Amino acid sequence: MIFLTPLAVYLRKHKEMKEIVKKAQSFMTFESQLEIGYISGLFATTHHQQQNKVPHWAVGSTRVRLISHYWFTQVLGHFGLLLILALLIVLFTSNTVELGHFPAILIAAVLSFGVLLFSQYLPRFMHDFLPKLETVTSTYQRELAQQEIAQLQLNIGQQKKEIERLKLAVSKSVEEAKKCREAQLSNLAVVLIYYIFAQKAGLPDLKADNQTSQLLMQLYGISPVSIRQNLELITGAGGKGKKLSGRKATETRSRFEEAFQFFENQNYAEGTQILKALEMKVFKP
């Protein structure tokens, strides 16, 4: 067990060194820069960084940026590294390097770049890098579209839930309002009850006019048109009391029953008596 730990450390370091050498070799031969996994990762990273700077950064703009990165970073960086290595080899193998050698070195560098440009960089760009970049761009666009569709579906689902919640709330409100309307006294019954209270309080006789209708509307929140029609029925204005027959008479008696029930629940006998007298007046032959 004592010897296993150093051995494991040695093997791990040896493996790491092999990986480093392999990556360096791949970089020197200009292979790692053309791996589709590398291009895909660089594309995603660049697009994300640019979107943080420019909110509506397009996928096509990232494609153009990677093409620029290929020429001005990868190609020039690769050639620059080769040039530096060549200069180091010359410095270490040559006894004397004079200043006059540099123009020749510069010419050799330019010629070498031209050879690599037309034999390596440009062909690999056209036949390897660019097709892979197009594939990565197309895949990224498709993934973005799928994400947008998924987000849209999620939003639609949330909106549907919100609509269902609102529909349920409206349905409950309508049901509650319906129950309130069913429990609420009719407009005629309310006017009858007010008429009885006004009689007992010694208030002036009610008139079937706009002023009285507006006052009762403020009190009960009922339509002034409905109030005025009911006042005309109670007071006999316009001969309304003589025209009750059939269905109208049945409905009116039902409204009187509501008012009678109200006074009976209050044990208000005097109100019941006044209401009976009013009923006889409304339904007189």
Image (cartoon, helix red, strand yellow):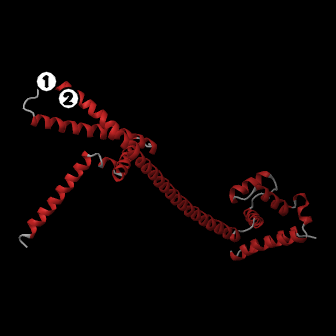
**Residue pictured at 80% horizontal, 57% vertical:** 228
Inspect the image, locate mark 2, and give the three-letter code of the amino acid beneath it.
Ile
Closest to the observer: 266 or 25?
25
Tell me the distance, in whole angstroms, between the alpha carbons under discs 1 and 2.
10 Å
Closest to the observer: 179 or 260?
179
**Residue pictured at 27% horizontal, 31% vertical:** 111
Q: Look at the numbered disc 2 and give the secondary structure of its residue.
A: helix
Q: Is residue 188 above or below residue 76?
A: below
Does label 1 or label 2 sit earlier along the sequence?
A: 1
Density class for disc 1 (Cα within 10 Å; few <14, some 14-19, many ≥20) is: few
**Residue pictured at 30% horizontal, 37% vertical:** 116
Q: Residue 80 at what x, y percent from top left?
A: 24, 36
Q: Is residue 50 above or below residue 203?
A: above
Whether residue 277 appears in this view of the structure is: no
Whether residue 42 appears in this view of the structure is: yes
Closest to the observer: 53 or 273?
53
Q: Is residue 74 left or right of residue 126?
A: left
- Badge 1 is on which residue? 99
